[in-house]
Image (cartoon, grey):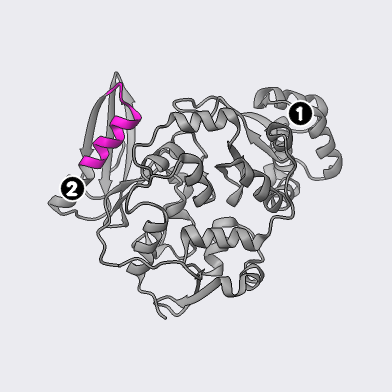
Amino acid sequence: MELANRVLNRTLLARQHLLERSTLSAFEMCEHLVGLQAQDSPPPFVGLWSRIADFDPETVSAGLEDRSLVRITLMRGTIHMVTSPDALRIAPHIQPELEKVPFRKGFNYGAMVGLDPDEVRERGEAALGDGPMSAADLRAKAAASYPDRDAGAVLQTWLCQLPVLQTPPRGRWKDNSRPVWSRVEPWLGAPLEPGYPMAELVFRYLRAFGPASTMDIQTWSKLTGMKAAVAQLGDRLRTYTDERGRTLYDIADGELTDPDLPAPVRLLGWYDNAILSHQDRTRIVPDGAAPPLRAFATAVSPVLVDGFLAGFYKIFLKKGIARLRITPTRKWTAAERDAVEAEANALVAFLEADKQPSVEILDVGADLRP
């Protein structure tokens, strides 16, 4: 059965809870989505606000404090906010690839080349111990341990080699403190689970992002072996083809969504996985090419109109005013413009309730900078 691109779009939005806000808790949503991108502190809150009705951001703060939620480097080598069980399950799959990075010639101009990885890891474990430690303190220990090497490179190596996570206060509501790191197992009081099946992780990805190709799954995870994992799932999956004839896999009981279903305007957080988690992004990005990550690094965020990327926004704070500026990537109808403005005002009220809101919709392709 061939699936039209618009079917893939509406199905993705439904599974991402972007067609209708959900009653799931923040914990349940993180579990369903297999985490939320959390390179910075605000994006997970925007992502949850866009997906959960009457979302209370303090539930995330509480989850980070009671350790049911954690911020950890996982898929694509980037920080995700996940449930603590997922941190223990997924980290063992990610760690082998992370640990290779620092000893390649391209890492910090070869700063770690020539050192014994096992010895470096042992020194890192001794330096970090079982308690949380700030990046600054850990960097000082790196300098003392390797005085002839770049301390920043040694610090980054330890953060790759040791399964670590970011502890509060960073990541709480309205708290963008500098990272404080802890090894995963002491913080969660439980061992890693290397036996968690890759096939199960693939199944969960398809439940939240499918139907999808093996290359889509690999793009999301940056892991190999997807064909073998798909094969292991057997009759738990069904197959389709897309408009280009490529094979798409989906969970056997996965529902496809009516392509004519209206899609409300949604403003997502920068790095949102709904945009970044397919090799073929035409199901949500009209030209199929998501902006480079460096664009999102400047806190530029996507606007979905009729279910597709149709603009970008950024919030500027100054003198008690929160200015949300939007640049469309195509011409919007009057109704679309009104819907974007209404959602933007709601987002500003959520994020910056103590500031005077200002929403500005610019011309197509205009520079967001004021």
Q: Nearer the viewer, residue 303 or 291?
A: 303
The reply to whether the magenta stretch includes residue 354 is yes
- Label 2 neighbour load within 10 Å: few <14, some 14-19, many 20+: some
Which label's residue is closer to the chain start, 2 or 1?
1
Residue 15 at x, y = what percent?
A: 42, 57
Q: Give the residue type that dot 2 points to.
A: Arg
Q: Can residue 271 be seen from the camera position used here? A: yes
Residue 129 at x, y = what percent?
A: 78, 28
Mark 2 vs mark 1: give the one in front.
1
- Judged by its main secondary structure, the magenta piece is helix
Quarter occupied by residue 148: top right
Q: Is residue 209 left or right of residue 23?
A: right
Question: For the residue labelled by badge 2, is the local secondary structure a helix, a strand or a loop?
Answer: helix
Q: Are marks 2 and 1 in contact (CB under 8 Å)?
A: no
Quadrant including the C terminus: top left
Q: Which region of the structure is painted magenta?
A: 342-355
Query: For mark 1, what is the residue?
Result: 130
Residue 354 at x, y = what percent?
A: 30, 21
The reply to whether the magenta stretch includes residue 212 is no
Q: Give the residue type that dot 1 points to.
A: Asp
Quadrant including the N terminus: bottom left
When the figure is inspected, residue 315 is found, relative to residue 312, above or below; the finding is above
Residue 337 is labelled as 2
